[in-house]
Amino acid sequence: MYQFEYTQRQQEALSYLSINNTDCELLLFGGAAGGGKSYLGCAWQISRRLKYANTRGLIGRCELKKLKQTTMKTFWKICVDIGLVKDIHYTYNQQEQTIKFFNGSEIVLMDLRDMPSDVEFTRLGSLEITDYFVDEVAEVSKRAIEILDSRVRYNLIDGRPKGLMTCNPTKGWLYNEFFDAHRSGNLRFDRAFIRSLPDDNPHLPQSYLDKLSRLSERDRKRLKDGDWDFDDSNDRLYHYDDLLRCFRDEIVGNKTKYITADIAALGNDKTIIGLWDGMTLVEIHKLEHKYPNEVADYIRQLSVQHNVRLSNIVVDADGLGIGVVGILKCQAFNNGGRSTEPEIYLNLKSECYFKIADDIANNSMTFICKSYKSDIIKELEVVRNYTANTEKRRQVTPKDEIKRMNGFSPDIADMIMMRKYFDLYPNYRRYGVR
């Protein structure tokens, strides 16, 4: 009979998580510190287990240690507040990391970090749950959430799967698929997003709000103002405002035509071909499920149509791309190749990404193909300085890691990055390979 003290935002979230809501299956709640994210998730899990017998929930975070030190402290406090007594109303098995209630319901505590020995999360393979709550989901890969979501099938309440995720503002797949999609009115019908700020929580003391106000601009924007567009991380390469400025109808550079192409492995990703006029990206062409000879024919036709010299065409030579290079006899781009400044950059790909970032910051690159605006911004923003805060040579985030954490491959970003090849090797021999 205990009445939880929910804020207005938390009540709004619960309306989406209710069995009466027949659309929403996955809710992202949060946007700043002090918005009551952990309280909402823990209270929701407890109330569901008590109300619905023989159901199974999951509470997860990137690391089990962090889960116990943070989220579960809120969980145990709520248990005390509502009068649940250990070993009478519930039992906690620390070895199995399960909480079993008197009515047959249970909660599983789960470590959701990516492990090299379990990239496909086979540890979740035999798990069946009714619903789940993932705290600080920005620390968890999209792949982990996809696998976890596929496990929601155990004793579903009225046949409706439900999931709750919480986080502070972050870039990546959460920004694109929830915040930005919600803002533009394109959020999937089975998803919901609720932005919760410290001012929405009447239970916070004024001293805590004052403390948030005294944070550095970077932390204040994220943790107090809940600004999803602000990103001042020290591993960032591309500023959001600078990227927006690139989309204007102005051709910059030497007006020479170029073609850059990121070639996909057959059946994976997409082949992305860019047509450049100087430092201006004029057109983007996407090809799917094409063999090297078909891609080569397409690039050849594009070069004839726009009068692009063969020496001004560069193709990603990794994988099937080497076949396209062999057919066209054009320039070959080897991502792991030696950079022009090997003492600074780990490889050619990293050097190009860092120097393209300088071009964008200096307002010397434009994108006329505005229909790809959101894709270009989304992909460039997830390419980061992978060796920030270290003394190692500069390196960008590996492509496989971007795929795992964000659920997409930065193929357009790679195509843009290769434009810098012609500036690094302006007079390289016609059939040069790097």
Image: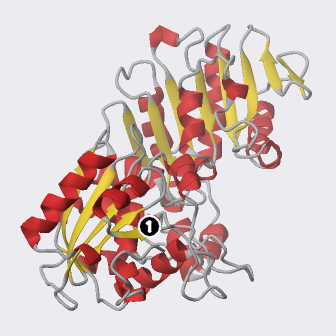
331 lies above or below 118: below
Query: What is the quadrant of residue 115 in the picture?
Result: top right
Res 3 visible? no
What residue type is disc 1 on?
Glu
Q: Is residue 294 left or right of residue 60?
A: left
Q: Where is residue 32 in the image (x, y as percent from the top left)?
A: 54, 60
Residues 279 and 230: in front is: 279
Residue name at image x 67 percent, y 32 percent: 121
65 lies above or below 45: below
Q: Where is residue 322 in the image (x, y as percent from the top left)?
A: 43, 57
Q: Position of residue 364 (x, y in %)?
A: 29, 89
175 lies above or below 190: below
- What residue would you read off at disc 1? 381
Query: What is the quadrant of residue 90 in the picture?
Result: top right
Residues 16 and 161: in front is: 161
Disc 1 packing (10 Å; few <14; some 14–19; many ≥20): some
Query: What is the quadrant of residue 209 in the picture?
Result: bottom right
Residue name at image x 26 percent, y 51 percent: 295
